[in-house]
Image: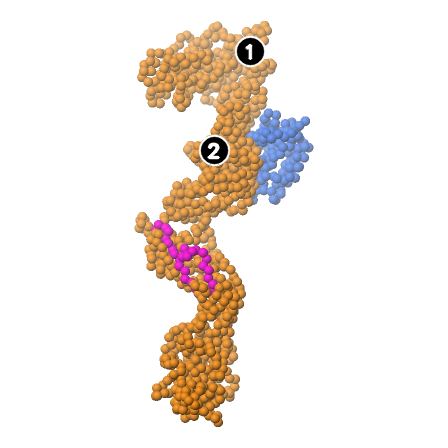
Chain colours: A blue, B orange
Amino acid sequence: MATTACFIIVSRNDIPIYESEVGTATKREDAAQLHQFILHAALDIVQDLAWTTSAMYLKSIDRFNDLVVSVYVTAVYCDIFLDLSIHTRFMLLHDSRNDDGIKSFFQEVHELYIKILLNPLYLPGSRITSSHFDTKVRALARKYL
Amino acid sequence: MEPDVSIESSSMIQVAVLPIGTVPPNMLRDYYSMLLPLHIIPLSAISSFYTEHQKSPFAHQPWDSGYLRFKFVLGGAPPSPWEDFQSHRKTLAVIGICHCPSSPDLDSVIDQFSNSCKSYPSSLVDRCFAFCPDDSQLEDGSRKGGNLRLFPPADRQTLEFHLNTMMQEVAASLLMEFEKWVLQAESSGTILKTPLDSQASLSSEEVIKAKKRRLGRAQKTIGDYCLLAGSPVDANAHYTTALELARLTGDYFWYAGALEGGVCALLIDRMGQKDVVLEEEVRYRYNSVILNYKKSQDNAQRVSPLSFELEATLKLARFLCRRELAKEVVELLTNAADGAKSLIDASDRLILFVEIARLYGSLGYQRKAAFFTRQVAQLYLQQDNRLAAISAMQVLAMTTKAYHVQSRASICENSQHNKGTGSSNADSGKKHHQSAVSLFESQWSTLQMVVLREILLSAVRAGDPLAAWSAAARLLRSYYPLITPVGQNGLANALTNSAERLPPGTRCADPALPFIRLHSFPLHPTQMDIIKRNPAREDWWAGSAPSGPFIYTPFSKGETNNIKKQELIWIVGEPVQVLVELANPCGFDLKVDSIYLSVHSGNFDAFPVIVSLPPNSSKVITLSGIPTSVGLVTIPGCIVHCFGVITEHLFKDVDNLLLGASQGLVLSDPFRCCGSPKLKNVSVPNISVVPPLPLLVSRVVGGDGAIILYEGEIRDIWISVANAGTVPIEQAHISLSGKNQDSVLSYSCETLKSCLPLKPGAEVTLPVTLRAWQVGLVDPDAGAGKSASGSIMRHFKEGISPSLLIHYAGPLQTSGDTPTNGSTVPPGRRLVVPLHICVLPGLSFVKARLLSMEFPAHVDNNSNGGHVDSQSKMDRLVKIDPFRGSWGLRFLELELSNPTDVVFEISVSVKLENSSDEDNVSASQDASEYGYPKTRIDRDCSARVLVPLEHFKLPVLDDSFFMKDAQTDGVSGGRHATFSEKNTKAELNACIKNLISRIKVRWHSGRNSAGELNIKDAIQAALQTSIMDVLLPDPLTFGFRLVRNGLESQNSDPDKESNTDVESPTSKDSVLAHETTPMEVLVRNNTKDLIKMSLNITCRDVAGENCVDSSKATVLWTGVLNDITMEIPPLQETKHSFCLYFLVPGEYTLTAAAVINDANDILRTRARTNSADEPIFCRGPPYHVRVLGTA
């Protein structure tokens, strides 16, 4: 079964720093745009919801048509040198109901993201351009979603 | 579905408002706006119009506190199929609006109105309001009566009051109609149908079922009317009954309807109070409403009551819509959005999305709202007509804020609006700043581009060229890196096409291309430097320029930097320039029709320029303008006329963009992708405009090109300075600066000063004398040796020329000023006139040698100390006759070469100065020039020039000189320690310098090149070794003279000959043979000591034979000739007379020689003897005697 999934990492100022279409469904441009629109709109809900729970995985928080938005919120990253506090959110738009898989996916991506953050050359809050990260994320998506 | 539903909307009476006849749109809007506040009519107000015909069915009507609520629908609404189900969907009243001046015939108005009312069969009350009737119409109308209501012209307040009364009348009528209807329905019953029922099959079972349900439905409808009549208690009673009946009959749909009405009645009843319990009650009941609507959908029917479920959901969401309940509301709205798929009617879906968007918006979820707004826009865009496109465009415009793609116009409006309310000024400022920055935080670029593209599409469809232009501009400017060149071209075409439909000169708030950043403010050109004036000092400019030998000192550096950063002074009326850099990162040729500085302060005239930028290029251009009045100037950006529209490009925006680019937030730096180098952030300085100052401009007469000079050339140039300002110059001062200042021999400061005050437009020409420096000289101190080689070719370099600094200033007080403020002296200015001197290697000096030469004796005085200014004497000087004997003469030989391609002529001159001694012996030598013949040096040739060094003897042989001598030579250093070394050395050096400076080697080339070779150092080096011989006189000088006829014919006195140099050489020195010739020999002691000596005089003939002593003597004599012992007192002369008798005519030479006895050290040193025993021998110059006569 072809699945649709769009994964996006949103950082400071609600700016996406990583985005990828990880679904197996054939890609259409307007669909990809719609995915981004849905995820962008879901940020409103995330920003309220994130503070109501101590869990990182917020499960499905929003949906539009058949597409469900699941969100994973990382701990706030504070950089006292750069005077930054970065509140990173992983957002996955999907049409599958595999809750456990999604949770595992988020956790593994979180590890990858921490590795990125540990890179001294990576400015927290800037775009993730590592192709290695991209490959790994896609592999995880294949594995869990 | 209906838009804008809420729980309370069940209690609103729908009133159609129809324009009758032709009503101008603005009038209609005006009348409608007067009507709108009257949507609530208190029951208490209508009692005067109310007459109770029968006993009212609304037993519990709250006459004190109740209201009738109206919902005005402009243009009316088509009858809803569901109007039986919910009475508030019926159009219960029709109000016509007529503008009398445009429809004069009241009869036709009445006709039209009644026609219009026919399409609203459910209407219970019809009224036509006619505004602004004239007198005849008033008269006519009052006779007509009926439904026509005339509103006589009056001011707005009166009109509103009148309208209010009319509405109260309408409300009262409606109330009475409701009563009538309810009474009728209660007594006779009514048939109520919904589209759901009409689809029901005609089976008998259904008919029975319908009959059973009828009572409940009637009760529900009566309840609706009670609600409309403003009586919630009555309504509640009826609804309760209806609920019972509906539950019994399983009429879920009507059950839900009654439930909904019940909630509305509850809310109306509890008007104004909203507590948790009530909220909980409403939520509970509405959930069951939704549930029941959902239940009623079960039967597979073509018409679905889904819209009621969604409406109920929306109503509940609106009721709960608060931040604290956001989660619940979101849940409701998400469910509602899910229902959209099942909605069949596109307009229902539209309304649903609109409502969802509005609710999200009021919840503060801007992005959610934007999402659904965009869905609405897409639905509009699916309809292919212009009005839908306009709607889509306007709806999309609302989303731009959430997506950070706002038009700058809307940002400005917002901020202004915020300011106007004055609620949160600081907050709005912050927001504004954020939005300005976030415009470039284009990481959701996909979304932003999609939105902008949709706006562009809808604007094009809607035929709004300005909106289309703005959208295309934003798209192109912010997202050009993501757009293919083809796409960029398309956008450029869209811009041009839109602009074609716009009137020329249209302005748009959103800039398109190019990107413009501030490049720099060129500081004043050196010609216009402004110098702070210190009125207390004569040299008022002092202190403003860096002083000291260093151009950059660590102390002054910081200061100047600060000044540069913060302050910039412009002068009224003088053009200024600002450099800006433009970038076109797109793949098409960009033609900027005009670009000029945008100055908001209004005291600046900017000059537009046309620029065209090729693809992917950047360009630095100069924008200029003239400040027009005193004050501050702020330059926020540029006004650009490009793609047919005028836009303002702010520097700040591009700065933000570049900042974002450096932080990796923005897609790309437009300047870097155009290959422009990274530029540090230029801050806009504070620019102040000061009143006009004088302005000097200079030009070199004869062209401003470089002045080409040969080395050592001396030339006069003329510099013309003119006052190009509007203020006279009252103070001026000229000084020199830069390298090679000594090449400016003179400049005439007085000429300028004499012309002060220099009126505007006046011109002065100043002469400046230049002397070219040595080309090879890198450093004038160290390069002296090198210059002698003359082979170093240096080309003209910038920065080695000197420049004239002219400090000038206008009057201390401008005429308009109040004469009090001493601190505000208008500043002065500095004009730097660079003298572009290009020095070509000219005649080069190869070397200098001192030649010692045995020189022929001449009958004439050819020797020491001659004032020989006649050419003939000069000729003789160089003729050598080997038979006549000679005497030692020293020459300075200068070897010169001419590497250039012109011919040089050399003339050596020796300047004779009045000798410093005042003693009578060396009486009166005037300072005079001693010229030598010219020497011509062809190109690429060398030549030697001889300079006789005979005119430099000092008059006294003093031991002080030996001191100097000894020390410089190092032969006998420290023999006399009586003089301090310093003094003597200095004196000696002065002597040598004096000697050298008297030798001038001048050259001429062509018509107007003339100069002087600077070879002092070389001469000094050449003379160094034998300076003593050149400078010092012999201890004794000898001279002969003929004593003739008692008259003294003085000949060869070294010190006096200048007085007697009148006779021709032949007549003067010739004597006759066979005659006794009395002669004298004069011996002068040049030392300061008494000299004892023995003098010998010899006479030789042409062959050099001694003709006095030999056996064949041809000369007889009287007196003593040999071993004459003399004592000469210091600095005195002694005469010794004798007579000669020449036997043979011919030429003879007399020489005097002396042996000094008891010579002291001075003499020994002078004679360079080693031992004390050696005799010191002195010899005078030969004296030539021509003897005439027959042998």
Question: Which sits in the foreground, B70 or B795?
Answer: B795
Instruction: Specify whether residue B902 is painted magenta.
Output: no
**Foreground: disc 1 or disc 2:** 2
Question: Which sits in the foreground, B878 or B680?
Answer: B878
Q: Which mark is residue B197?
A: 1
Q: Secondary structure at mark 2?
A: helix
The residue located at (45%, 70%) in the rendering is: B934
Instruction: Specify whether residue B715 is painted magenta.
Output: yes
Q: Quadrant of residue B423?
A: top left
Q: Is residue B906 above or below residue B739?
A: below
Using a 10 Å C-alpha cutoff, classify the residue at mark 1 as few (fewer than 14 neighbours), some (14 to 19) or many (20 or more): few
The residue located at (46%, 13%) in the rendering is: B119
Q: Is residue B314 above or below residue A136?
A: above
| Distance of label 1 from label 2 (alpha carbons) | 57 Å
For the question of whether residue B963 can be seen, the reply is no
Residue that label 2 marks = B499
Disc 1 marks a residue whose amino acid type is Asp
